Image (spheres, rainbow, N blue to C red):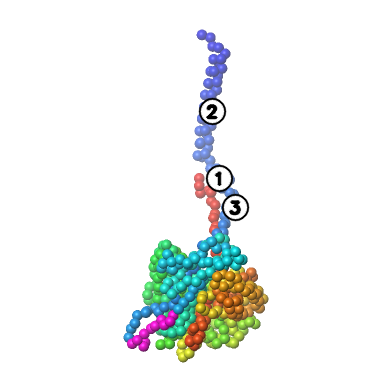
């Protein structure tokens, strides 16, 4: 049989396909062997070059919380012995106010022990330029938690709340006041003496849905180093609950104390309720809030003429503190005091001079400090207020509770002239007066909050140069009328974004 031309073509095509397939198979086998033997260079791996291996991203907190303590109460309300000598809360009353500023999506207040009881902050005129939401909620039976959701995080955005408690009768005579505090994992306090007659209760609130363990350490005024606490050093705070720790029992007989509060699992909010007695004479009530970070330059605005003033100072290294009075003209009467590391130093400054408006402290080492300003009423009754140090920021606020009076004290933390703007708002969030403030280097100034207009409820400070710190000196009319000494302080609350810088290093070579 003869082979045609078409048959030869088909046979040739088949032979070509077989040859091509064999060659392809050989190439694949060779490539597989090559990949097993040869390591590819880093430049062929997925990812970016080594010159851009680190990524940074700034994140901001848009949901912020603040905790307002309940009104002052006795640590032990039991009745013992002769009725003439039984402790009494008298006619204690209280008030709290909450404010939110800027681009706020929602701000609400709930009782810490009853999340179903919610009050939402309101803006009486949403179309005005003020953008301030306000509310007043009672702390008579429960502490409060304010939760604010911001639309953006920038200077001038945030919340500021405060609480005041007062009495003209009973063992809680006087005025206690405080700004509400934000939850955090670590906090520190400077406290007055824990000797006989002093009751100090640390109240720790856990606003989260997870319980946490809290560790407490205390340093005293007698020796350097932390104290072995007589009541243990750890407490557990349940989810959405509060726990109380007796500071005066744990570290008794100290002239002053420095305390740290550290939560293991979740951020907590902490305040110390303080009530002091000298026999049967009330010697003051106050809320102590966490101190600011240690610094080489501290300013404590608010102590004025006739106040008896003392300082509590703590440092981690031996140093010398330079202490000066602040006046409208600058610094005066500077004195030096040695500070021993890990031991609270109590400095008695005596009566504040006639022109005093605050205290300045400088040191070569970082310090933490507060001032104790004491006033005297009829008889042997006294009251005191605690002034904490603060950091100058671009924007901050002070909110004033109902039924109290406030005088603002501003202080320049630098040695150069400084300018800032104060803006007042009433209880509905309506804008009141605006005042420009100019302070000379290291100078201070006092002005009455009522100068902004009737019904003043909150004030903001815009300080582009970040030079001023301020506080509100709080008194109460009924207490004054009863000739009872009453004094408290509300410190500034920053209206600044809370940010963190996240670092990520890319190492693609770990994936092969």
Give the main secondary structure, helix, strand or loop, of the magenta stretch: loop
Residue ID at (62%, 70%)? 462
User: Pointer 1: what residue?
Assistant: 45
Q: Calculate the distance from the C-alpha at mark 3 to the C-alpha at mark 2.
A: 43 Å
Q: Earlier in the sequence, mark 1 or mark 3?
A: 1
Residue ID at (58%, 78%)? 450
Name the disc covering residue 23, or none. 2
Counting the numbered discs, the total is 3
Q: Earlier in the sequence, mark 3 or mark 2?
A: 2
Q: Calculate the distance from the C-alpha at mark 1 to the C-alpha at mark 2.
A: 29 Å
Is 471 situated left or right of 274 in this image?
right
Horizontal and vertical percent for residue 444? 61, 79
Identify the magenta region: 82-92
Is residue 88 inside the magenta stretch?
yes
User: Pointer 3: what residue?
Assistant: 52
Query: Picture quarter containing residue 211?
Result: bottom left
Is 335 situated left or right of 208 in this image?
right
Q: Calculate the distance from the C-alpha at mark 1 to the C-alpha at mark 3.
A: 14 Å
């Amino acid at each position: 049989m003869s082979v045609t031309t078409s048959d030869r073509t088909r046979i040739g095509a088949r032979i070509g396909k077989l040859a091509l397939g064999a060659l392809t198979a050989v190439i694949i086998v060779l490539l597989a062997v090559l990949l097993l033997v040869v390591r590819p260079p880093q430049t062929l791996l997925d990812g970016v070059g080594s010159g851009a291996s680190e990524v940074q991203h700034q994140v901001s907190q848009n949901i912020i919380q603040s905790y307002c303590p309940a009104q002052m109460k006795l640590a032990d309300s039991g009745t013992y012995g002769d009725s003439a000598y039984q402790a009494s809360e008298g006619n204690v009353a209280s008030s709290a106010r909450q404010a939110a500023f800027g681009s706020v999506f929602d701000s609400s207040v709930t009782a810490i022990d009853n999340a179903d009881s919610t009050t939402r902050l309101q803006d009486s005129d949403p179309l005005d330029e003020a953008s301030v939401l306000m509310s007043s909620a009672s702390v008579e039976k429960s502490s409060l938690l304010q939760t604010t959701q911001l639309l953006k995080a920038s200077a001038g955005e945030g919340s500021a709340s405060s609480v005041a408690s007062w009495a003209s009768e009973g063992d809680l005579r006087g005025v206690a006041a405080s700004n509400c505090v934000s939850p955090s994992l670590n906090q520190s306090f400077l406290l007055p003496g824990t000797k006989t007659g002093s009751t100090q209760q640390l109240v720790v609130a856990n606003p989260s849905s997870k319980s946490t363990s809290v560790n407490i350490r205390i340093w005293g005024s007698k020796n350097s180093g932390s104290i072995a606490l007589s009541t243990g050093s750890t407490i557990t705070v349940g989810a959405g609950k509060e726990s109380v720790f007796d500071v005066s029992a744990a570290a008794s007989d100290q002239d002053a104390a420095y305390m740290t509060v550290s939560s293991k699992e979740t951020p907590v909010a902490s305040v110390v309720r303080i009530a002091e007695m000298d026999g049967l004479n009330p010697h003051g009530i106050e809320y102590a809030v966490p101190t600011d970070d240690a610094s080489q330059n501290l300013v404590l605005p608010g102590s004025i003429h006739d106040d008896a003033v003392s300082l509590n100072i703590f440092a981690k290294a031996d140093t010398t503190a330079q202490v000066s009075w602040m006046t409208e003209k600058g610094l005066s009467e500077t004195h030096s005091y040695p500070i021993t590391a890990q031991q609270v130093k109590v400095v008695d400054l005596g009566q504040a001079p006639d022109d005093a408006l605050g205290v300045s402290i400088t040191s070569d080492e970082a310090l933490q400090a507060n001032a104790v300003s004491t006033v005297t009423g009829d008889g042997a009754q006294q009251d005191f207020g605690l002034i904490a140090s603060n950091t100058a920021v671009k924007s901050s606020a002070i909110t004033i509770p109902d039924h109290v009076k406030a005088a603002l004290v501003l202080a320049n933390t630098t040695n150069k002239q400084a300018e800032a703007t104060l803006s007042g708002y009433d209880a509905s969030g309506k804008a009141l007066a605006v005042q420009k403030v100019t302070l000379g280097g290291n100078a201070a100034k006092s002005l009455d909050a009522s100068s902004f207009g009737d019904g003043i409820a909150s004030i903001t400070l815009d300080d582009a140069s970040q030079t001023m710190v301020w506080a509100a000196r709080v008194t109460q009319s009924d207490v004054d009328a009863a000739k009872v000494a009453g004094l408290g302080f509300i410190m500034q609350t920053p209206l600044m974004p809370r940010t963190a810088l996240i670092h990520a290093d890319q190492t693609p070579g770990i994936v092969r």
